Amino acid sequence: MLQKLNEVKTEFDSLIDSVSAMPDMAQFKADYFGKKGKLNALMGGMRDLSVEDKKSFGAKANEVKQDMLSAIDKRSQVIELEAINSKLEKNRQDISWTEKITDRGQQAAGLHPLTKVTRELEDIFLSMGFDILDGPHIENEYYNFEALNIPESHPARDMQDTFWFKDKKHLLRTHTSNLQIHGMEVKKPPFKFVGSGKVFRCETLDASHEAAFHQLEGMMVGHDIAVPHMIHFLRTLLSEIFKSELKVRLRPGFFPFVEPGFELDYECLLCGGKGCSVCKQVGWVEALGCGMVHPSVLRSGGIDPNEFNGFAFGLGIDRLTMMRYHIDDVRHLHSGNLQFSEQFRAY
Ligand code: DAH
């Protein structure tokens, strides 16, 4: 009987590793442990053994049985793992397309040069304690003109060719100076804020004129603010943007919402003031309009001009971006041409 048991076990050991699927394993198990299985058949023979032999054979048979069962468990785990692996292998997804995209010359997105310059400007003002405001592109006359001391009959309305809506009441803002009025409505002086965005003018397009372009507006209102404060902030701004100490100069300029009003120029960085094609041989480049906020503008914002005063400025972001990156035609900025914008990814 013992010999028989050993034979069954040897056969079992030699066969188990060739079982390679779970249904086959169920059959294999039944071959040994089923009702008509080989082990049961052996056990049936125990009837003829003496009590002593029954005991010793029973113990041995039990031991062998446990070994076989645990071998079946182990082999089953291996079979299941192999099944999972082969399923994964079959369903494998080809994700090498990410590399293929790069092969085709498409790369991760980058920021547009206008966005980069705008963010840099905002960061500089944030570091100087300014808040950042946003305002609408679609305006009414009040915010774009009237509250800024540009009444209906004022010739300054014709200085900027306005896109009007059919209702003749609404317009696309012609400058970001509308932010001055919106800002004063929500802030109590003293305050200082900047805001930027698109502005629109019905222009004849050429290398330096676009119908939609970008400005940044700033306003600082408080007690005893004077022109030197304004110059300090604006020179700091330009020096930070161009990463070098800049010489600036003020010229008188007319803007109805400031008095006195100025145009601020900086010494041309390309020729150091000697004169070149970029500065049109004058050695200076126009940077922005600025001035001390007109008392009637303060009043529009509900601020008493006898108690508070301040400065405001507006600069063209497109021109600054062109200077910064040596771009010779403003129309490139809106062309949507990837060959153009891709040049700025690394900056
Ligand atoms: N809004 C003016 C323009 O579009 C720019 C400007 C000039 C803004 C003087 C100002 C300022 O705040 O004080 O031409």
Image (cartoon, rainbow, N blue to C red):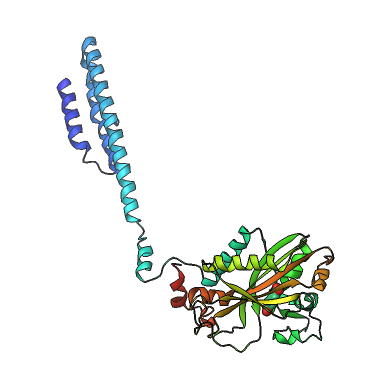
Can the viewer see residue 36?
no
- Residue 293 location, x and y as percent? 76, 71
Please give left or right for residue 212 compared with residue 141 in the image. Answer: left
Q: Work out whether 80 lies above or below 138.
A: above
Of 104 and 272, nearer the camera is 272
- The quadrant of the rendered image in which ligand 1 is seen is bottom right
Please give left or right for residue 154 compared with residue 289 in the image. Answer: right
Can the viewer see residue 93?
yes
Q: Work out whether 36 lies above or below 329.
A: above
Q: Quadrant where the N terminus lies?
A: top left
Residue at the far front in the pictured view? 274
Of 137 and 287, nearer the camera is 287
Query: Would you identify the image quadrant in which residue 82 lies?
Result: top left
- Residue 239 location, x and y as percent? 56, 67
Of 240 and 197, nearer the camera is 240
Please give left or right for residue 105 compared with residue 53 in the image. Answer: right
Q: Work out whether 25 lies above or below 172.
A: above
The total of numbered circles placed on residues is 0
Residue at the far top in the pictured view? 52
Looking at the image, which residue is at 17% across and 25% down?
A: 6
- Residue 166 location, x and y as percent? 75, 85
Please give left or right for residue 33 compared with residue 261 in the image. Answer: left
Of 278 and 167, nearer the camera is 278
- Residue 151 location, x and y as percent? 81, 81
Query: Would you identify the image quadrant in which residue 36 lies?
Result: top left
Looking at the image, which residue is at 60% across and 65% down?
A: 236
Query: Would you identify the image quadrant in which residue 219 lies?
Result: bottom right
Looking at the image, which residue is at 74% across and 64% down?
A: 225
